Amino acid sequence: MAVPGSSEQIAEALFEGALFRKGISPSKQLSLPFTTDFESKKKELHAEWNNARDREKVSRSRFAQHTLSPEAVAAELDGVRAAIGRNEDVARFFHEVMQAANVPVQVKGKAINVHLSNEVPRALRQAIGRDESFAGRFDLPLEEGEVYLGRTSPVIEGLASWTLDQALDPVARDTRAVAARCGVISTSAVSARTMLLVVRLRYHLQIGGADTETILCEEIVPLACTGPADTPQWLTPEEGERLLAARPERNLVATAIDQQLSLLLPALPILQQALEPVAITRSAAQLAAHERVREAARTKGRVTIQPVLPVDILGAYVLLPRLN
């Protein structure tokens, strides 16, 4: 509750009120300076009190969140978490990269011990900023001596940067790289030849008003399809996410891999064109989500969104069904 003035003013007014309620005549208390203008001080204090009350009402209404339903907030929050990655995604990424780089990681409950030695690539140690073994945890709170391995942790960011360099470095691709932008595997996760694309979708978000503001937004999503490149049959986004976890279950001969890559690489420009309707559909979904948030926050102004074409294909992989 808002209280105007100082505590001394309030105490003085209450003291004067107590004196008058007891029937003490102001004429008998002329030696006390606060009795001479009691009524004026009383009116002034009441006016300040009412003003403070009105200011508090305005402040509360300005920051009120009563229009936000828990269900709407939960839906948007889940979307954000799916886009940026949850702790489980970070943990899976960390373990898979460390395993591919032959770095020993020991799991102890919810904590891990990472064993670094001179055999670990120096570039990797420099990227994560660690030369010695350390203990870490993907969830808070931490125990003494542990390193937080969240999505924005310097260790995770450095590891992601090193992994990307591995995929882009032609020298690393000729050796044992931990990641590649193109590949072929045989897996039981699919029943027909499937192309899995990791694409970056970019949008120009324009907010109207006195001065139109343009914001560049982007998202990276896995999209899977079957059939020919010019008329692909797109699978659901959930299927694309699921196929990210597909693992090779049978060795392929070099000639089979070369054959599949010779079919995949020339098809990428055609797939870029086929991705344009997908980008338009996803931009409409992004606009709807943005408008829901703005409506809940009572934000005014016209909003439009346009996809930036062509779509960037960051990675392309062929998944072949496993043959018994």
Image (cartoon, rainbow, N blue to C red):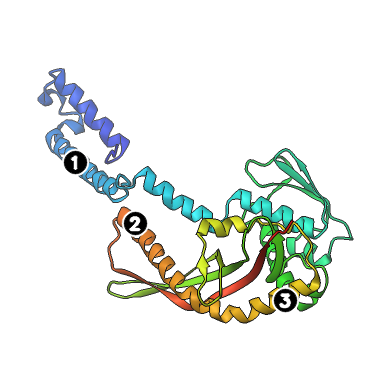
Badge nearest the viewer, 1 or 3: 3
* Amino acid type, callout 2: Arg
In the rendering, at what x and y percent does residue 315 appear? 63, 71
Front position in the image: 161 or 317: 317
Residue drawn 63% across the image and 44% down it: 139
Badge nearest the viewer, 3 or 2: 3
Q: For marks 3 and 2, give the CA distance.
A: 47 Å
Q: Which residue is mark 3?
A: 259
- Residue 53 appears in which quarter of the rendering? top left
* Amino acid type, callout 1: Asn
Q: Secondary structure at mark 3?
A: helix
Which quarter of the figure is the C terminus placed in?
bottom right
Count the marks: how many? Answer: 3
In the rendering, at what x and y percent does residue 106 appear? 80, 45
Q: Earlier in the sequence, mark 3 or mark 2?
A: 3
Is residue 7 in view? Answer: yes
Is residue 216 in view? Answer: no
In the rendering, at what x and y percent does residue 275 appear? 49, 73
Q: Earlier in the sequence, mark 1 or mark 3?
A: 1
Badge nearest the viewer, 2 or 1: 2
236 versus 144 height, above or below: below
Extreme top residue here? Answer: 22
Residue drawn 72% across the image and 66% down it: 179
Q: Which residue is mark 2?
A: 292
Q: Which residue is mark 1?
A: 50
Q: Earlier in the sequence, mark 2 or mark 1?
A: 1
Extreme right residue here? Answer: 118
248 versus 275 height, above or below: above
